[in-house]
Image (cartoon, coloured by chain):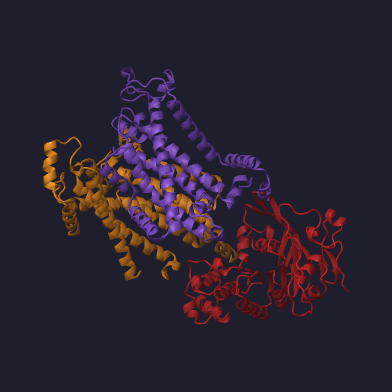
Amino acid sequence: MALLEVEDLQVSFDTASGRIFALNGVSFSLERGEVLALLGESGSGKSVTASAIMDLVPNPPGAIDRGSIRFDGAELLKLSRNERRDLCGNRIALIFQDALAALNPVYPVGWQIAEMYRIHGRNPEGGVEKAVIDLLTAIGIPDPERRARQYPHEFSGGMRQRIMIAMAVALEPDVIIADEPTTALDVTIQAQVVDLLATIRKRSDAGMIFITHDLGVVAELADRVAVMYAGRIVETANVFELFEDARHPYSVGLLASQPRVDTDEDELVPIPGSAPNPVALPSGCAFRTRCPRAERLCAEVIPPLETVGPGRQAACHFPVLTA
Amino acid sequence: MSFTYFLKRAAFAALALAALMTSAFFLVRLTGDPVNLYLPVDASDAAREAMRIRLGLDRSLLAQFFDWAWDILSLDFGMSLWHNRPAMDVVLEALPNTLALGAIALALAFTAAIVMGSIAAVNAGGWIDRGVNVLSQAAASVPDFWLGLMGVLLFAVTFRILPTSGFGGPIYWVLPVACLFARPFGTLVQIVRGSMIEALNATFVRTARAKGARDGRVTFVHALRNALLPAVTVTGDLAAQFAGGGGVVEVVFGFPGIGKLLIDGILKRDFAIVQASIFAVAVVIFVINILVDMLYASIDPRVRVE
Amino acid sequence: MTDTSAEFLPARERRSRRILWLLRALAGDPMAVAAAIWLLIVVLAILTDSLSLLGDNRISLKARNLPPFDFGQSWTLWLGADALGRPLLVRLIQAASTTIGIAVVTVLTSLIGGTLLGVIAGYFGGIVGNVIMRICDIILGFPTLLVALFGLYLFGPSVSNLVIVLAITRMPAYIRVARAETLEVRERLFVDAARVFGGGPTWILRTHILPSVAPTMLTLASVNLAMVMLFESGLSYLGLGIQPPSVSWGLMVAQGQGYLSSAWWLGFFPGLAVMLTTMSFNLLANWFRIVNDPSQHWRLVSRRR
């Protein structure tokens, strides 16, 4: 049994221009010790997936309409509000994209990390204070005793993101969800944060969901990739298969539109058109309006996510076959 | 809180006071008859002439100004015509009453507004929220003098459990405090509700939830501390407004504060009292501003570095 | 994305769509509807008064301090009569003209004056801008009521002085907002572009800056209407605002004060009128702000609130 299993998840939001479906039946699973990358453009539903797992979908205007999220054998959507909260931070932790906004501006960072222990009633050996200092040392913050008493605005962007990460790993959770943890950072700092995440990954057997639109980070960290488009998963594959032999035309387009060092091709081909309007998605396959391979069937039938090889799936009527 | 900051504040307060008083001095002498400030409109011509000589209005404008400015700078605000005592003495007697009245009303309004505003924000859109909205809008819209009269009608005239007006034990404070409470309460509930909703939707509140904090902790530990910032600013502004006295409310209840003193001074044309009251109010506002800045810095660490 | 498609509609159709949307949004907020209805009643009452459709308002000794809710009498006496036997309802309507008239004129004065001064301070800056802003700081450094009282003391109570004094106490808020918006607009590229293409300052002000500043200023004005009404009522109550034989709601409360124990309605109804009208202005201002903030729109249309 997988550590985390998401099945047929549908999430919608009320907006002034109508009801939009942010997730349209998303299914995936995560094993212990595995890093799964959720890859897609902004608006594809990656962050909403994380929110749904953490019970952070704002209601109203949002609502989980159907589906299931199973964690360690328990159905999360059937748990009470407080039972969900007890799992969060403790066994499933979330790292936010923008650490400056995600840290509370009026409390010292040490206090905010220590709060993890306090909320879940943990008493680490040597006391909470020592645990916090040890964590700050472990993530590479110099002079941790002094820094713990400082406020978020007194740290650099990279440091703040490290503190977010320290907070997430404090209670050694089973699942760590990182929601674009490097997007808001400079490129050099990005590399440091990715290194830190890689170290954490090596040290624990936690499963990690890594949400990103950055193929480079995916290649560096992920074991498996789920590509998302317009609220659906359109392809899942292990990271090598995806880079070598993507099946869904969207994945192929995504790979072609980003620079790579491992091939000789130096021409970047952007995907034509723009992401579809979530209020009025095209009928059938949402990608068909931008897809070079689209035919009449694509406008009539939504392609289901089907197994296209050992351990890999794609949702396309006319998958790309390179071999 | 550095010394330069203090000096800057003090310099501005002094400048503002000087500008107000000086422009008033010249405006009155250039556009009208200053005797009107000292005598009722129906005073006789002989009385007007006597006052004109007594005030030295026959001298040059500059000579008058330097005399006046010198008196003010040596903290001599003149004799009150009605009380027949130095005006500042009368003002200093009234000031503590006003400060206590304003402080009690504001403290109650602030506390009640935090509670009601938070409850409304947590239930945003629900019927509790709508109820609180109507109540606070009504409180923010009610004319305080009318609320006072209705209070007198209900509790003093009909039920005879509270005094109509006057000054003495705690019972004399109930109605004035209740009347002064209404408008700041209504205003602050709206502010707290708004900033609380904003704080509850902020990313750091999502973080708190993601950390596993339950609703109570999220609301009161994480959101409220941030939502307090605008409420403190507005309370500071309201406190400055109150420093001018509970104005109309003090008049309704015959409460011997600086608002009643000032308004009586105006109606009875007692210039020394008006002048001294404004000076005292300016000093109080200066102190309030410094206190609010200090309070703000203690709530928001981001202010400290600046 | 209905909004983007509306861009391509002819202007007339777009406008009617906008009005439909406003009406629909208004229907979603019962308090705003109630407020709008009350203000409509007040406006209609003022209109009937200005067209002198109100019947007589003579002193009548028979009706002295007649209690309200005596529906056997003529409708003008349904809210009772004052100490001179004048029908209270008619007096209330006459006072409404004064009170609301003064509030509207005051707000328009401070709106126009404040916008102009603020735009000047923001667009030209320099010494003029600095002087304007320092004067604002000084006015805001004192309690509004104190400044208003002091002004009326210096210049004497009269309708024009009341309007001027109240307008000046409220003006700094407009100046600050207008200046901030102007600075922001001025920094934006399109004004640079306009300057490069030879637009003079007045042209830039009219076509670029005023349209950007207008919505914020109107929101501020709608909030200030209520505030100015409260101040005018307070000053008139004290005897420093509207003077008899003119009549305003605040003055009526003061006149009814002496009859508190014998004829409570004389002070009750005018104060209630102030409260309901102020509250309606506040509620509509609130609603106006939500309508002008696209991120709040879902609140007005969502079924699952």
Q: Is residue A224 visible?
A: yes
Of all chains in the rendering, the one displayed in orange is B
The correct choice, above or below, for C300 with respect to A278 in the image is above
Q: In the rendered picture of this protein, how many numbered marks are placed on residues?
A: 0
**Quadrant (top left, top right, bottom left, bottom right) of the N terminus of chain A:** bottom right
Residue A14 position in % (x across, y down): 66, 51
**Which of the two residues, B34 or A180, is positioned nearer the viewer here?**
B34
Q: Quadrant of residue A204?
A: bottom right
| Residue A111 vertical placement versus B30 (above, below) | below
Is residue B94 visible in the rendered structure shown here? no
Picture quarter containing residue C260? top left
Chain identity for the colour red used in the image: A
Q: Position of residue C112 (x, y in %)?
A: 43, 46
Residue B146, above or below B101: above
- Depth check: C200 or A41 in front? C200
Counting from the top left corner in percent of width and height, residue B214 is at: 56, 61
**In this orientation, which residue lies closer to the viewer: B227 or B118?**
B227
> Quadrant where the C terminus of chain A lies?
bottom right
Q: Residue furthest front?
A: C198
**Which residue appears farthest toward the right when viewing the image?**
A323
**Colour in which the image shows chain C:** purple
Q: Position of residue C69 (x, y in %)?
A: 42, 24
Asked if C25 appears above or below A218 in the picture, the reply is above
Left or right of residue B148: residue B125: right
Q: Considering depth in this image, is C115 or B219 the residue closer to the camera?
A: C115
